Image: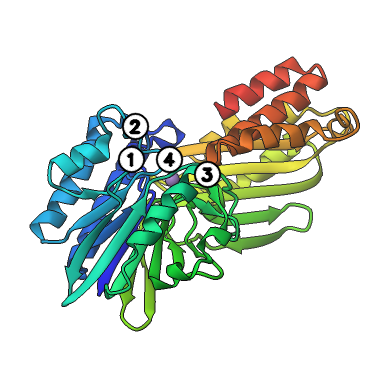
Amino acid sequence: MKFAHLADLHLGYRQYGLYERLEDYNRAFEKAVEEVIERDLSFVLISGDLFHCGSPPAVAVRSAFKGLSMLKRAGIPVVAIRGNHDGHFERGGNYLSLLEDAGLLTYLEGERFYTDLKADRERARILGIGCLVEAQLVERLESVKKAIDPSADHNILMLHQSFDKVSSKDRSWLVHSAYFYDDVFGHVDYFALGHVHERCKHPEFPAYYPGSIEYWDIDDAETHIFDMESGRRNFKAKKGKGFLAVELDDGIRVEPVEVEGRRVVHLVFEYGEIDPRVASEEITEILPEFDEVGSLVVVTVRGVVKEGCRASDLDFKAFRKALGSVLKLKTRNELRHPSALAVGRIEGRVTPERAIEEYFSALGEEGKGLSRLAIRLFEYLSRNDVEGAKEVIVNDL
Ligand SMILES: [Mn+2]
């Protein structure tokens, strides 16, 4: 049997505060649906985070209705679980409950944690647990183990967690692989995972993450690194975004299906010692090459500021002018003062930077941006550079 495995659609997410990004996420979902129908896949699994929040805007809910209705008309059933973003299901349910009420999907939650699907004269038992803290998850797993059906042609387990053995930046909602060493999980042919936004696989189990359907993290984008000392350029291709087309028979075949989105470019300018005024002119000369209508550009500048210069002298206004056609330019001033490097350690144990990173890491991807902002504010303010700190706020928020 052949099916589609989607996760982390985040409908309703206004990335960078842009309504256009919300539309991009809607479009990616609808494109994926068209591709599923075109390929005549037998069913669709959505492994959590269909929505970006518990109360998504109507335009996102309508997109979900539109895509799921297309699947329904094509006779393609959909099974979904709750991600950490989808909202609680207690007290009257969430938007997945609403979609189930409308007959658009089967929502596995709580006591109802499995369903059977037939395709190509085979029967698949689909089991699913929504996102939980590990202790609760492990408790639920006991019931799931009893419901794994060795007489079914296939057993598929849907989860929305990160795994200890999957190398990912996101360690939130973690579960340990050891819980799955029980023999009974040998009957699970495929683990349909969600939560990690990169496309990847567990090193031991037939467990896959399709990754988010749209670009989410700047590290996934097309990246150009300019070594401004040597004049050398490095290029890192973007990572694919979309979903997985999975075929189960005696073995597993997993094919990534790309869903093309808006062009996102990360430009990194690396200096050793830097005079921000001179650097601004040099960078402004390079930027027009990337002035493409509708694209998203993130510019990062790194280096150690020369004595007598200020990090806030980077001329972001000139950058904006050079990139007049892009949908959004986001600038990241990662310049450091030599003195900031010596801000030192708290009680001789941990640097303030490390403490801040630790604190925000609980928020996952969004925490990364916050910790970067907090660290830079800390650097400026610890030098009593209030003007510099204001610049950081103006440029970053
Ligand atoms: Mn997610």
- Residue type beneath disc 3: Ala
CA distance for labels 3 and 2: 23 Å
**Comparing labels 1 and 4, the label whose residue is closer to the camera:** 4
Residue 135 shows which numbered tag? Answer: 3
Side of 383 where 279 appears, left or right: left
Asked if 96 appears above or below 43 in the picture, the reply is: above
CB within 8 Å, label 3 to label 2 = no
* Residue 259 seen from this side: no
Mark drawn on residue 51: 1
N-term mark: 1 or 3:
1
Using residue 143 as the reference point, say whether residue 61 is left or right of it. left
Tag shown at residue 54: 2
Between 255 and 136, the one lying in front of the other is 136
Secondary element under disc 1, as helix, strand or loop, is loop
Q: Earlier in the sequence, mark 3 or mark 2?
A: 2
Question: Which numbered disc, 1 or 3, marks the residue closer to the eye?
Answer: 3
| Real-space Cα separation, disc 1 to disc 3, in angstroms | 25 Å
Q: Are marks 1 and 4 in contact (CB under 8 Å)?
A: no
Q: Identify the residue at image location x=37%, y=40%.
A: 21
Q: Residues within 10 Å of mark 3 (few under 14, many from 20)?
A: few
Disc 1 marks which amino acid? Phe
Q: Tags 1 and 3 in contact by the CB under 8 Å rule? A: no
